[in-house]
Amino acid sequence: MTHDIFAAARARVLEALARVVPGLPEAVAARVEVTLPREAGHGDMASNAALIVAKPARRNPREIAAALAAAFADDPLIASAEAAGPGFLNLRLRPAAWHDLLRGVLRAGESYGDSTLGQGATVNVEYVSANPTGPMHIGHCRGAVVGDALANLLGKAGWKVTKEYYINDAGNQVAALAWAAYWRYMQACGLEISAEAFDAQTPNGLQYRGDYLVPVGEALHAKFGRSLLGPDDGIAPAESWLVTVRDFAIAAMMDQIRADLAALGVHHDVFSSERKLVESGAAAAMIERMRDAGLIYEGVLEPPKGKLPEDWEPRQQTLFRATAYGDDVDRPLRKSDGTATYFANDIAYHAQKIAAGAKVLIDVLGADHGGYLPRMRAAVSAIGGASFEGVLCQIVHVLKGGQPLKMSKRAGTFITLRDLLDEVGPDAVRFTILTRKSDAQMDFDIDAVVAQTRENPVFYVQYAHARCRSVLRAAEEQFGAAALAPETLAGADLSSLTNDQEEPQHRRMGGWPRLVEAAAQAREPHRIAFFLYDMAADFHMLWNRGRDDATLRFLQTDHPEETRARLALVAATAIVIRSGLRVMGVSPVEEMR
RNA sequence: GCGCCCGUAGCUCAAUUGGAUAGAGCACUAGACUACGGAUCUGGGGGCUGGGAGUUCGAAUCUCUCCGGGCGCACCA
């Protein structure tokens, strides 16, 4: 039971349409919508049915709309139905229709708005997937929030969701991490060795100089003493310590990342290790499987267009026929030294997700990985069994007091996610990020997000919810908890809810299920934030009516029946706000402090 | 040079995916607190949706073309 009044109305419109214009093709009917009009003057619901049908039926849209309107003339829940504009059908509902809606919301609770759109199909949302080479910083934050909210949204819209984190623990980066950790280990052993001196003795240079590895060095010292050092307290041969230190450091970084994510309210269902994938042989097996399927050949790529890299030279490589699946060029799966590329492992990884049952794969990535999507899409499409989508998160410019903050991971001068959370709090971080479409660049001004003003939508929305709860608490003292049970409120006589001020609230609430579906389909969780903001605005307006005119307050001691009706509205409002905040991962606070 | 993303009020962003008169906040401006917490509310000014052409009943949205910003362009991950 979805209680989607727009879906219900659409079914009725289609029914009427079938009588007015017999023999309509399915494809045409599918384009018929019933939506909330932007203009309140256009009624509570509007349908484009006549406009869609007019051309195939070779009839005047106004005439069709008028015929549709006539079909709704005697409906007990419809106050008026009329043709308008070029051929819209505008419906205005009777209060009783809104009262039915309210009862539906109260009975459904936070499941109001749940949809069956996803039909239980398994979707795998991969997000964050930061390299385990350092703490989470602000750059990771957007993907974490967007991915998490998207996963929640898809869950509400009827998909079976797996939240997954891919640990890139197999490449050169983690080797560099091991060297950096070893440097800190030497320092923990009491050896004086500067970054410059160590850098000169490190194969690929000392890449991670941030002091976040100091505790890792100390922990290594605590566990291994001086046993990892070379004979004369120098750097021991890498074979003797690299794997040990690397695995130790990765584990430490992942612990920290998990803790950082938890502080942001992000929890993944599955953590997959690239290294395990490679060591299990699954990655190599994948290449063979693709070779058997004729997806692979040995060849030489054309030089890239434009200015050539200085070290470019033609090379014989193992290539995937990505161009056959829509990519611009074929992509290498093996480097010239024969080892697998990141891409090759990633294909095996995505195949693993498909094998686990996922029908839809969604990767939430930073915009700098935008060029990577076509080849991954090509690979998934070649393998088959699931569809692939990428959600790109554009760069976040972090400002403080209007000034941009520069950061560099290697120099260790970055703002960690933890710092940000300590200053701003997870609710404000999550909400603020979700007030922008993910593929638009955004400025994140720390001062503005910390400010508890109207400019900051998270407080505005939370305040609306807190006000709802405040009313309900006051009512509980007056009437007792039993009177506020959803079923009791749903059973109340709601007929007093008829004034114009309450209508926007009803309308908004009625649009929630549709919004959930649309946002899920478009993979755009930010729409939830805007919806909640509007919903909060409606409620604040109602509240203030009561301040100007005492008879419009929610609690009317002398009129218990009206009070119950208004409490039903307040309770339903709180339910919808909570339901939306839950998708966003923002806490619905009981009171502001 | 090629590909992807973006361009909407002075600023930060929306616009139910092709719907009717393009909306919010900030800033500017004029108002409302003996309250169920004013962290709120009411009103006003502010737009050739970067420019131009096309598609149709209808375009911020789709197509083409310029202009301006961001990102990415072999064996990095």
Image: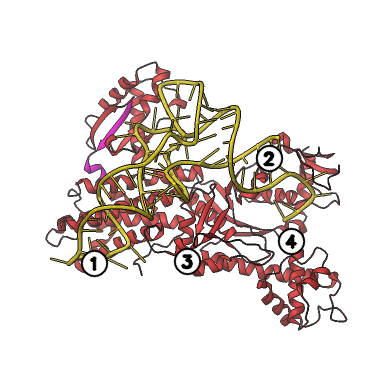
Would you name the residue on which mark 4 appears?
A173
Is the residue at mark 4 from the same chain as the one at mark 3?
A: yes
Whichever of callouts 2 and 3 sits on the residue coming sooner in the sequence is 2
Would you name the residue on which mark 3 appears?
A425
Mark toward the viewer: 4 or 2: 4
Would you name the residue on which mark 2 appears?
A378
Residue at 77 percent of width and 51 percent of height: A341
- Host chain of mark 1: A
Whichever of callouts 4 and 3 sits on the residue coming sooner in the sequence is 4
> Label 4: how many residues lie within 10 Å, few (<14), some (14-19) or many (20+)?
some
Would you name the residue on which mark 1 appears?
A474
Q: Which amino acid does label 3 sit on?
A: Gly
> Tag 3's secondary structure?
loop
> Label 3: how many residues lie within 10 Å, few (<14), some (14-19) or many (20+)?
some
Identify the image quadrant of residue A92. top left
Please check the rendered image and state whether residue A548 is part of the magenta-colored stretch, yes or no: no
